[in-house]
Amino acid sequence: MHLVNGAIAGYGHIGMTHAENVRNNLRAELCATCSEEKGWPSIESLGVIFYDDWQALLDAETIEGLDAVVIATPTFTHAGFAWMAIEKGLHVFLEKPMEFALETYTAIVLIAWFTGWVPARVFGIVKRLFHDDIDTEDAGMVCITYENGVVASIDPSWNRPAAFPTWGDLTMTLCGTKQTFAIDMFNQVLNVHSNLTAPGTTWSTSGTDSDAEMLSTFVAAIVNDPPPPVSGENGLHALKIAIMAMKQAKTGSRWSGKLW
């Protein structure tokens, strides 16, 4: 069985998650990682080659048979890193918009992928309401009207306090004429109350690991060559909606019309 040889760009919180998922995938092997942060103790535990420069990793002759890269760097660096990897003929795992700095709006990708509908009008509003220690908006609302008359609203707010068990939530509710369908991606957990942990209440995951499933789908697309469930075109449409929502929020002008 051919193992997909992968490298990780970026070794912050999400980079650590992806690295662990690559190592746990039976069809993949982690062979290198790259990060400007050298102080993470867990980097040495990976037992792979470490680089502090992305180009050096891509040019390294010591990495034989590199098939794919996972880009887990800040959003504003994605486009450059992805293009360098594509020029090397590598498969690229990129979970966020390629060059859109306001990361809270990446949730809109779910709507673009799940429905495939074409937006006709976009309304957006952003504010800073919850966190005084950051220099960016932390609250927002996006409303979309599609060409078929369906209306969608997206709340990308980063409104959880530091004591919350995790960084936020990921939910979706579809309201139809005959039934309602709800998804809660973080609901498969056990609530653990303890005086030994901070915060006092933590979550212990008991269900499917969505990050691991996402990585497995990527590996399967390389090995078996099926079409990926989320394409680059989906990401492009989502990015255009997000940019239009931000433009509307900043200028107050309502956007209406086709995305392309």
Image (cartoon, rainbow, N blue to C red):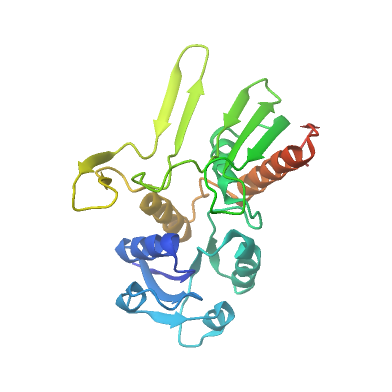
Quarter in which the N terminus is drawn: bottom left
- In percent of the image, x 51 and y 45: which residue is there? 229
The image shows residue 251 at horizontal and vertical percentages of 79, 39
Residue 2 visible from this viewpoint: no
**Extreme residue toward the bottom, this view:** 61
Residue at point 35%, 60% (across, down):
21
Say above or below: 88 vs 128. Answer: below
236, 131: nearer the viewer: 131
Above/below status of 10 relative to 100? below
Res 43 quadrant in image? bottom left
Say how many tags the image has.
Answer: 0
Question: For the point 61% across and 46% down, which residue is it?
Answer: 137
Q: Toward the viewer: 161 or 104? A: 161
Visible residue check, residue 163? yes
The picture quadrant where one finds residue 185 is top left
Quadrant the C terminus occupies: top right
- Place of residue 171 in the rendered image (x, y in percent of width and height, measured from the top left): 45, 34
89 lies left or right of 146: left
- Left or right, 82 with respect to 29, comes to right
Say above or below: 188 vs 76: above
**Residue found 67% across the figure and 43% down from its top:** 242
In the rendered image, the residue lying farthest to the front is 132
Camera-nearest residue between 126 and 241: 126
For residue 156, side relative to residue 165 (left or right): right
Q: Position of residue 161 (x, y in %)?
A: 42, 44
Q: Give the image location of residue 249, x and y in percent.
A: 72, 38
